[in-house]
Amino acid sequence: MLKNFFLGLKRSAFMNKYSPSESRESAFEYFKDKVQKALKDNNKELFSEMLAILLNRFTIAAQNSIKDAEEKSAVKAFIISLGADAIAPVKEFISKSHIVAYPIDILFALIDKKEALDYLDSMLTVDDTLFDDPVVEKRIEILKHFAGETHPSVLSKVSTYFNDSDDRLVIASIRFVRDYAFFDKDPDVEKVQDMMMTRFLDPETSMRIKIELLNVFMDQEWKVQSNKKQIEELLPEGYFINAQGYIRVINTAVKARED
């Protein structure tokens, strides 16, 4: 019982963003020892339990941002050093948590890129979100890792996000398409173009999202195939459709984008 009490104190210190960094670092060393001993004893249950505690460190942000980043980097490096044994606990954490940036980085260090992307694809849900839903942050973080990739399953899921109630997810989805590597004569291109232009023409669509949509057409070098006059009437200042049907922006226009 005393042993469990001590473990609880260490866990509390490790997860207290207000405690001195020395206390968190001491707790980190304690849990490192626990993890290594469990691994040596082939105690898989204890190993997973202690590793879950370490992974939970990524869900809080200490007041000193520099120390916070240093501490998280140390935890990340240690988990990666465990190799294949850490894969299952990391995947389990990603499946349950909404704060997954560091765990995803760890996963990419432990397994090959294709396997990691396939796993992240399985973590992307398509159910509607509520206002300020924490799952939105998880989806956004996952989508970042598909930049420049070709993954039809994710593209299909992302298409359902275009009309999400959370603009952050809408914008992340649009940027995903902006960076997507379509195949030549990909049948999905026309479908995605139509969906994006439907959103652009929607009177409820904000100017910020309209500009994000226009950026996709420019970066993907897509032509405006229909509704040209209607689209031109809604273009923000500085944007135009040239004679060839491509959307362009004059140098003085400001593009609302973050690469």
Image: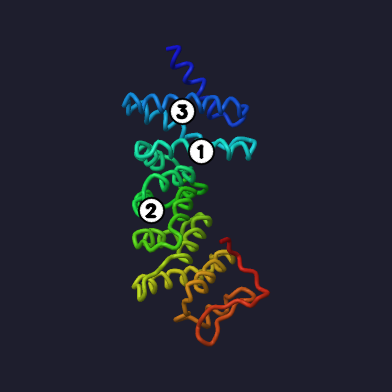
The local crowd at label 3, few if under 14, some if 14 to 19, many if 20 or more residues have their Cα within 10 Å, is: some
Query: Which of marks 3 and 1 precedes in the sequence?
Result: 3
Return the residue at label 1: 58
Closer mark to the observer between disc 2 and disc 1: 2
Residue 123 lies, in percent from the top left, at 37, 48
Query: Which of marks 2 and 3 precedes in the sequence?
Result: 3
Q: Secondary structure at mark 1?
A: helix
**Front in this rendered view, residue 91 or 212:** 91
Return the residue at label 3: 32
Q: In the visual, does 26 lie left or right of 181?
A: right
Residue 54 lies, in percent from the top left, at 46, 32
**Front in this rendered view, residue 225 or 198:** 225
The N terminus - image quarter: top left
Of the residues shown, which amino acid type is indicated by label 1?
A: Phe
Return the residue at label 2: 113
**Residue at figure coordinates x 44%, y 14% from the top left:** 3
Q: Secondary structure at mark 2?
A: helix
Residue 185 circle label: none
**Residue at figure coordinates x 53%, y 38% from the top left:** 72
